[in-house]
Amino acid sequence: MNPAPVICFGQQPCGFFPRRFLYAKFATARRLQAELGGEIVFFYHDSDHDPRETQTTLRHRKSDTPLTLNFTFINKTQRKFSPLYAKKIPVGWREQTARQLPAYVDQRWVAAFKAIPETTCTVADFCLELYRAMGLLDGIRVVRSSDPAFRTTACLIDDYFVDVPYDGELVRARRSATGSLQLHEGGNSFITLPDTPYTAAQISPSRDSRLRWMQSVIHCTHYIAGAGEQAYLNPSDAPEITFVARNTIDRSDEAYTDA
């Protein structure tokens, strides 16, 4: 007998209200599940560190004017270099942001937003809990790339980042071709960190090694690829996977709040 399908899609935290392209991945996965059966796995790549990933663009409910919001961060080091699962939310951010939301989203989502305790959440936790409150994760297994158990089970890769301490914070440093760990400050500017030992539990993949690393644990049969992923994914890294393009959706980079 063929094993039951495992339908997977991956995404970084992408806005505290999810961007519409992420909603389209959820919808595509549920469509496939209705056709094929099996389970859906959301590979939540919360090891990414780019603060731009969590920008959230909302539309005014009357004027349709866009507004882009984002988290604020404890300090510059966290903002630039800490992985999203380690970026901490400053006290006051939730209340300040919540005051702006009624003009942009339904009251039930304002209430869901306010119900998440900012003082105990990281950026990645906050996004995930709001997706859960919106019902997007119902019946879906969530696997996080920050999970040490996942990392230690995954296959070995030679293109990766390492989570290490720096400047009093946990940062995501790129392993260079020479084996040193570096933080990219922009352009051609890098900070080379002192040599430090690390284990597989601290490693997360680069863009080009992510598929093989993820698949070594999840063993999915179908993978839903977004428009950007289709440009760089190498199907030969996982020939056993059937790749499926996500559903099309308008204003794909704006927030989805219609759930």
Image (spheres, helix red, strand yellow):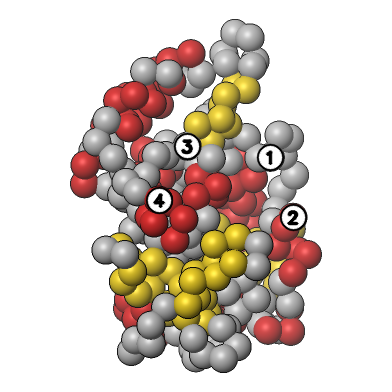
**Quick one: quadrant of the N terminus?**
bottom right
Find residue 111 and report its horizontal and vertical position in percent.
32, 24
Q: Residue at x 27, y 30 (%)?
A: 92
Q: Residues within 10 Å of mark 3 (few under 14, many from 20)?
A: some
- Secondary structure type for disc 3: loop
Q: Earlier in the sequence, mark 3 or mark 4?
A: 3
Contact? badges 2 and 1 (CB < 8 Å): yes
Q: Quadrant of residue 131?
A: top left
Find residue 126 and report its horizontal and vertical position in percent.
35, 44
- Secondary structure type for disc 1: loop
Q: CA distance from mark 2 to mark 1?
A: 10 Å
Q: Which mark is residue 76?
A: 4
Q: Nearer the viewer, residue 95 or 221?
A: 95
Q: CA distance from mark 2 to mark 3?
A: 23 Å
Q: Residue at x 73, y 35 (%)?
A: 250
Contact? badges 4 and 1 (CB < 8 Å): no
Q: Earlier in the sequence, mark 2 or mark 3?
A: 3
Q: Is residue 31 visible?
A: no
Q: Residue at x 49, y 86 (%)?
A: 180
Q: Which residue is mark 2?
A: 227
Q: Amino acid at mark 4?
A: Lys
Q: Amino acid at mark 1?
A: Ser
Q: Which residue is mark 1?
A: 252
Find residue 11 and report its horizontal and vertical position in percent.
55, 57
Q: In the image, which is nearer the foreground, mark 2 or mark 3?
A: 3
Q: Residues within 10 Å of mark 2 (few under 14, many from 20)?
A: few
Contact? badges 3 and 4 (CB < 8 Å): no
- Secondary structure type for disc 2: helix
Q: Amino acid at mark 2?
A: Ala
